[in-house]
Amino acid sequence: MTERCSSFTDEPLPGTATTETGWLCIENESGWGRDPFSGETFAPEVGGAVERFAESRGLRVLLIRRPGRIGAPRGRMRVFVADSVPGRTALREFTVADYAEIPGLPLDDPAAGEPAGPIALVCTNGKRDVCCAVLGRPIAAALADRYTDPVVWECSHTGGHRFAPVLIVLPAGHTYGRVTEGQAQGALDAARAGVVATAGLRGRSSIPPAEQAAEVAVRELLGPVGPDVLRTGSDGGGAVTVRHEDGRTWRMAVTSEELPPRMMSCGKKPSPARAWRVTDLIADGN
């Protein structure tokens, strides 16, 4: 049996979410390349304009499509814009008839676009890594069957193929890895209920890895709480603080530990990995 990058399961999940503060999710039902700007989706001049638009606003571009609807024609395409920064968490939906309209979207107008509820993105981009396609597509299809609203989407590369199946819940940007069908449903149901599930949680995309690991540790202590009730901070030397909006505080040490090399993506040579370890957790004001 061919060894895949997702075969390595000794790497702890907390602290491994891709660090992004915002997302630009563009509906596209055609075949995808290795990344949104590899030439298969946008004409060169349009792709360049979309890329500059996203970079100027700190947005990570993802292509999305409804599971089981590859190639289905659409008159207009959905575009979701998510802000994942704690305290600003928001998701807006726009529609466009042509991708050339995207750089003109009025994102600076807080009233523009339609407010949207949480959506789940499952990475299925086989052009980038076979694990995402083989493991992600069944999760996306099973999850989509459970909801009548278009809240479940396949998406292009999110980062972390070796944690496939990978799920991102927007707008908060909480990222999950090695999810089962039940865990994926639990993560989306929790978000729709206004809280965060911890099973398979890798971290929140808008904060650094050490703070991601610390936040996951506190969430596991607390159980389901809202995405924005916690704030994290670090002194840069390994000490991380997590504060609850009710005044409770947790302080801990978060260190990185080198792991044996492994494939970060199928077909690649092994490279070093790290585990984020939380120790000396002290609760103040509890």
Image (tube, rainbow, N blue to C red):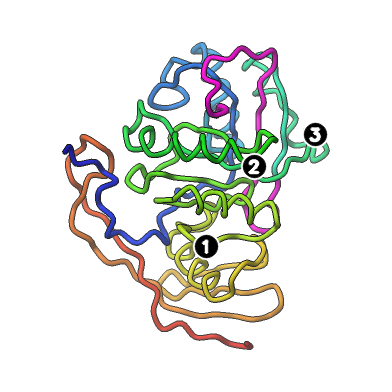
N-terminal label among 1 and 2: 2
Q: Quadrant of the N terminus?
A: top left
Q: Position of residue 198 (x, y in %)?
A: 52, 62
In terms of image quadrants, where is residue 76? Answer: top right
N-terminal label among 1 and 3: 3
Label 3 secondary element = loop
The mark lying in front, picked from 1 and 3, is: 1
* 3D distance between C-alphas at marks 1 and 3: 32 Å
Label 1 secondary element = loop
* 3D distance between C-alphas at marks 3 and 2: 13 Å
Contact flag, marks 3 and 2 (Cβ < 8 Å): no
Q: Find disc 2 in the rendering and name its residue.
A: 82
Label 2 secondary element = strand
Q: Is residue 78 left or right of residue 183?
A: right
Q: Quadrant of the C terminus?
A: bottom right
From the viewer's perspective, is residue 87 above or below residue 218? above
Identify residue type, mark 1.
Thr
Q: Is residue 54 left or right of residue 133?
A: right
Q: Is residue 75 magenta?
A: yes
Q: Find disc 3 in the rendering and name its residue.
A: 112
